[in-house]
Amino acid sequence: MSFGKLYAYKVSSVPFPPNHIPFLSGNAKVDKIKGNARTTAILAVAKANNVDIELVVTEPFKGLPAEYLEINQLGKIPTFVGADGYVLTEAIAIAIYITSQNEKTTLLGKTKQDYATILKWMSFFNSEFLPSLGRWFSPLIGREPYNKKNVEDGQKANLKAVDVVEKHLLNNTYLAGERVTLADLFAASIASRGFTFVYDKAWRSQYPNFTRWYETVYNQPIYSAVVDSLSFIDEAVKFTPPKKEAAPKKEAAPKAAPKPKAKEVEEDEDDEPKEAPKPKHPLELLGKPTLALDEWKRQYSNNDTPDALKWFWENYNPEEYSLWTVDYKYNDELTQIFMTSNLIGGFFARLEASRKYLFGCASVYGVANDSVIKGAFVIRGQEALPAFDVAPDYESYEFTKLDPSKPEDKEFVNEQWTWEKPIVVNGKEYPWADGKVFK
């Protein structure tokens, strides 16, 4: 009898969403990702405990039925539904619940401290390790739009998390205790994404403890029973821009038949007024600038930030463009960092109509319940409002013109576009927390 159902991706492979076509080269060209980082450990302990779980293939990007949204309102996976009707979401909770079905299990440790340490490492890999790893490899394989700076930031953040594990494993065989626990199974399944795409031969030589631990856990019978044979990559996946398809040749249009001469008075003339032409963006009236903003956006996306900034200042024309600082007016109402970041994202989305005339970054500085929003933009023309008033919520922001001839204003722009330094507001220093690019 089935113990319950697990709604998750198909274990053997996870296809890319239809609108995310991978652009890879050589042996990196794949159209599927093996397994599911947050599900493998659940299936491993279920098999080891002889807990019969029915896997219900669920792929959110293909759409979800209404009945699934009733058991998981966020529409995420995995979700467990027991034969008795018990519903459980969140991968860590499901993994612990399935593991605990064996009352003699050693996978949850022997003491309360063991158990707390296991939870610590599972949480670390789920909330610190996996998001940064995803920001590193996902754009490289076409699952997300490629942005060089975002990939580099993801890599730096992930390697920082890897360092934590590497130091711990210098004197420890496993994450929690002297034997394999659920923490190792869960963490290894998440780290597998790195070994599939970016943890190459050079990386493995730099992190021998992490690699040794991963290989040890992978070859444990409880884990190897639900995954493919262990293999390593020699070189990390590299981003290759998609080739532009040649435009099809246009066929010669047939010659139009001669129009009959209009009568002085057309008795049957249509009285309906013609549709008025769409109004042009006010900044379009400024004409074509010598500096193409799209070229600057390409420089920023595809080059190291210091090199891109050097190019920007060499080509910036203050007669054609202006620089502005952007400040949120209601910082005292900001709460969680991720919510504030989403606020910036929503503002950027509503600036779409001005994308041709605008580039900039805005960041959240500070911590939860004590943060500020600040950014810097380059705008076609000398006024901010024609670019920003396309967003209904532009009045929630204050725009102040910068003078690039002043070293402090130029440095402010550099800092806003590199995200490396804290910011001082009203005498108080706020560390950088998160940021978004509008390009």
Image (spheres, grey):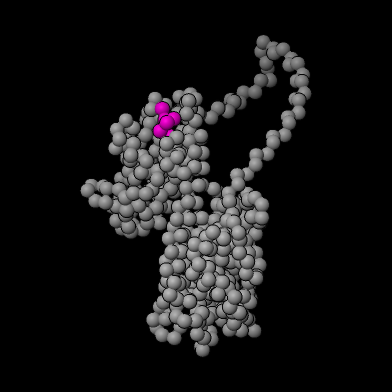
Where residue 56 appears, as percent x and y from the top left, is 63, 70
Q: Which quarter of the rendering shows the N terminus?
A: bottom right
270 displayed left or right of 182: right
Viewer-proximal residue, 264 or 257? 257
**38, above or below 310, in the image:** below
Decide if residue 171 is in sight here: yes
Viewer-proximal residue, 57 or 43? 43
View extreme (left): residue: 427
Q: Quadrant of residue 318?
A: top left
View extreme (top): residue: 264
Where residue 334 appears, as percent x and y from the top left, is 33, 54
Q: Residue at x 42, y 81 (%)?
A: 114
Q: Residue at x 59, y 75 (%)?
A: 219
Viewer-proximal residue, 248 or 265? 248
- Magenta extent: 312-317
Q: Quadrant of residue 156?
A: bottom left
